[in-house]
Amino acid sequence: MNECPDTTPGKPPVFATMLIRLSTMNDIRQAFLGDLEEEYRGRLTKADKHQADTWYWQQAARSLPHLARTAAGQTQLLALIGATIAGYLTVTVFDIYVARNAASAYARAYELESYLIPRLIYFLLKLSGVVSAGGLISYLTFKTDAPFWKNVRNRLAPLGLLLILPATWLVLYQSADYSSVYRLIWLAGIAPCLLAGAWVGARFTKR
């Protein structure tokens, strides 16, 4: 449960900025990022970098669904790319700011010597981010007149691959400080959680 590596002193999180750049149209990109960075620098003068970074990630997470819908008015490909990026960002935010913080807080509160329960909490909460990502993509991109499994194949599969391929590599070549059980929990849970979120999102969209 390491800290997020994509930070530079005085600069917004690089990965969040990159995701916004990839999912924003040229005519609004610079203005949008400029407003975010200006507010970010203002927050740095009032709070520590971790709080400012957290705010920046939150703004990115809130903005990407809207940006993806805006892209949908341009081309379906841009919409799919934007939604996939938004889904990946959702999982990333759950990982860094929800799952890790909750697991660390639990370990500190009970002064545990074993990391068994905190790691289980971490992976279960991270999987809840996958459920949310599946719901987000289905809400943004699934066609109501197409069968569910066709939508899954054409619109949910890219995010599934982005999550499953690295997870498979970690299971095969895992780091020494993690048990394979936790890696397998994560890998085995990705597809069911994506599908569950997509199913809920599709039901919500049809209402």
Image (tube, rainbow, N blue to C red):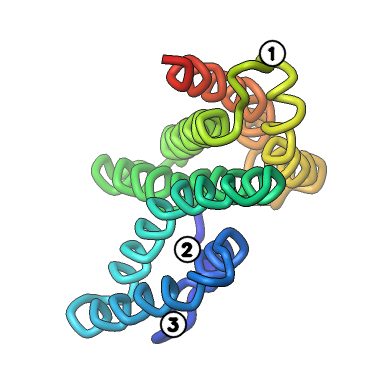
Mark 2 secondary-structure assignment: loop
Amino acid at dot 3:
Lys
* Res. 182 in view: yes
Mark 3 secondary-structure assignment: loop
Residue 127: x, y in percent? Answer: 52, 32
Q: Which residue is nearer to you in this view: 74 or 116?
A: 74
* Vertical relation: 96 (above or below) 99: below
Left-right relation of 90 to 177:
left
Residue 118: x, y in percent? Answer: 42, 38
- Disc 1 designates what residue? 147
Q: Which mark is residue 25?
A: none
Number of labels in the image equals 3
- Disc 3 designates what residue? 11
* Res. 6 in view: no
Query: Mark 3 vs mark 2: which is more N-terminal?
Result: 2
Q: Which residue: 72% across, 16% down?
A: 149
Q: Give the distance between the C-alpha atoms of the residues marked 2 and 1, in whole angstroms.
A: 41 Å
Amino acid at dot 1:
Pro
- Disc 2 designates what residue? 3
